[in-house]
């Protein structure tokens, strides 16, 4: 999801409601705050020797032990201000860094935003490692067996990567 899409979805909701981030491990604690917003330029080489470059935005959340959940308008204001200062983030993918009780920081993408019982829930899903050459052959939902077949293959001479 891009920053622009995230902000548009939030702005169509009641911004006086609390914004709560959740994932299968639980919900962020009341009193959380946005500790950092990062604009990252990434240049990489994958196991197939393809070079890629892209920009993305990372929002780091600090779990809060007490207090009240941040209202959506405050989150929107923080993100909009940061985007203006850092520049040109609207079309960049946005990811979240977060850990319940601030243990074991993980990287998440935003699955969906929904209103449930006078709360805005931002549902996060854990990001996972992937073999980009294998995903070109079988899509993003490949398994470890697919990776072995399409990526590194039975031998390095027939492999699309790891050469």
Image: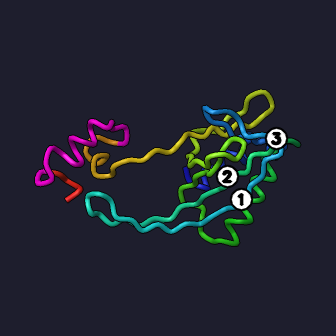
User: Mark 2 touching mark 1, by CB under 8 A?
Assistant: yes
Mark 2–mark 1 distance (CA, rounded to whole Å): 8 Å
Q: Earlier in the sequence, mark 1 or mark 3?
A: 3
- Farthest residue toward the right? 67
**Residue 71 visible in rendering:** no
What color scheme is it?
rainbow
First in residue order: circle 2 vs circle 3? 2
Q: Which residue is mark 1?
A: 79
Indicate yes or no whether the magenta region holds residue 147. yes
| Residue 43 coordinates in the image, percent (x, y) | 42, 68
Comparing 115 with 143, the one in front is 143
Spatial CA span between label 1 and label 3: 19 Å
Q: Mark 2 vs mark 1: which is more N-terminal?
A: 2
Q: Nearer the viewer, mark 2 or mark 3?
A: 3
Please give the range of residues in magenta: 140-158
Which residue is rendered at x = 74% and y = 65% of the image? 81
Secondary structure under the numbered disc 1 in the rendered image = helix
The disc placed on residue 30 is 3
Dot 1 alpha-carbon crowd within 10 angstroms: few under 14, some 14 to 19, many 20 or more:
some
Image-based side of 77 in relation to 39, left or right: right
On residue 7, which mark appears?
Answer: 2
Q: Quadrant of residue 144?
A: top left
Give the Cα distance between marks 2 and 3.
21 Å
Residue 19, x across and y down, in percent: 76, 42
Check the image and report above or below for 127 versus 161: above
The label nearer to you, 1 versus 3, is 3
Count residues near mark 2 (Cα–Cα under 10 Å), then give few for <14, some for 14-19, many for 20+. Answer: some
Q: Can you say which quadrant of the picture contains the C terminus?
A: bottom left
Residue at disc 3, secondary structure: loop
User: Which percent across, then down, holds residue 44?
Assistant: 39, 65
Q: Using residue 162 as the reference point, say whether residue 142 is left or right of it.
A: right
Front-most of residues 137 and 89: 137
């Amino acid at each position: 999801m891009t920053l622009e899409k995230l902000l548009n979805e939030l702005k169509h909701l009641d911004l006086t409601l609390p914004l709560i981030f959740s994932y299968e491990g639980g919900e962020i604690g009341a009193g959380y705050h946005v500790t950092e917003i990062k604009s990252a330029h990434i240049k990489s080489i994958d196991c197939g020797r393809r070079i890629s470059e892209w920009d993305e935005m990372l929002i780091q959340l600090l779990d809060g032990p007490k207090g009240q959940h941040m209202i959506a308008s405050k989150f929107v204001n923080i993100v909009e201000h940061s985007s203006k200062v850092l520049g040109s983030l609207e079309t960049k993918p946005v990811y979240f860094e977060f850990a319940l009780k601030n243990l074991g920081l993980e990287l998440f993408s935003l699955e969906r935003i929904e209103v449930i019982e006078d709360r805005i829930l931002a549902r996060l899903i854990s990001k996972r490692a992937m073999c980009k050459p294998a995903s070109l052959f079988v899509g993003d939902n490949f398994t470890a067996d697919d990776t072995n077949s399409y990526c590194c293959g039975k031998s390095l001479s027939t492999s699309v990567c790891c050469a």
